[in-house]
Image (cartoon, rainbow, N blue to C red):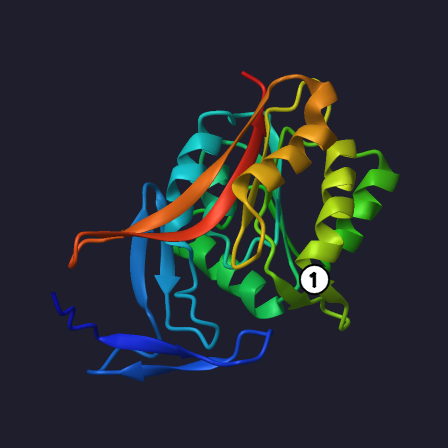
Amino acid sequence: MEWDADGEFIPGSDEEGGGRWQFARPVPREGWDLAWEEVRFRAQCTPFRHLAFFPDMAPQWAWMRERLGDGTEALNLFGYTGVGTLAMSATGSRLTHVDASKKSAEAGKANAALSGMAERPIRWLVDDAAKFTAREVRRGRRYDGIILDPPKFGRGPEGEVWRLEEGLPGLIADCRKLLDADSRFLVLTVYAVRMSALAIGELLNQALGELGGRVECGDMAVREEARGLLLPTAIFARWSKG
């Protein structure tokens, strides 16, 4: 069955994710508004294949929302345009949103305004996720929940280089220090790497096992309704209490 798509992304060959969009018909370059539950946000064809949000994260957002509420505090590392941050903020939780891209943080603030959440208690920070987490450890901070959605490769605001296989174990170790026996969850999602869900699940189990609770892992996907296909997109591992 042929699928007549409005546009197709043609990937580049470099590890930094270059490429270009090829459009079969006009697509709004300034983007278009979408919604998930209470959250309103602007979708857009970005230079990095993404649409300025990740639809496969919706089940994770729903799962995290069940574990948050008034008086809780969560940390979103590599928070991108803030859809997940706003989904958690809508529960009444306080959020700290960290991303190395100023443009992404500004998009997050714009999405907050679009959602009527501009006055919510959210810290929008442009920072290197690993450096920020290490500073939070030194400050003795704790969180009820942490979400990690790191890229395979990226750069911090001062040119810091992030490579997933090298940086992830240390980052998880620091995240463990921001959690305690009363914390609710840590969710890790990983894209385009040569790791299995079982491998990242074991990584979480080794780091967080002493806190009790349980670790789950598996595949994430999106459903392509036009052709009735389920398309794998990423793997995930998550730790939770109860």
Disc 1 residue type (three-letter): Arg
> Which residue, given by chain and number where applicable, does mark 1 sit on?
163
Q: Nearer the viewer, residue 125 or 158?
A: 158
Question: 217 above or below 15?
Answer: above
Horizontal side of 157 relative to 187 (left or right) equals right
Look at 50% across and 39% down and name the residue there. Answer: 89
Q: Nearer the viewer, residue 23 or 112?
A: 23
Look at 83% across and 39% down and name the residue there. Answer: 137
Look at 54% across and 74% down and name the residue there. Answer: 17
Question: 106 above or below 94?
Answer: below
- How far across and how far down the image is residue 207, in percent? 73, 32
Q: Quadrant of the N terminus?
A: bottom left
- How far across and how far down the image is residue 101, in percent? 62, 67
- How far across and how far down the image is residue 73, in percent? 62, 32
Look at 46% across and 81% down and name the residue there. Answer: 19
Tell me if residue 129 can be seen.
no
Q: Residue at the right extreme?
A: 138
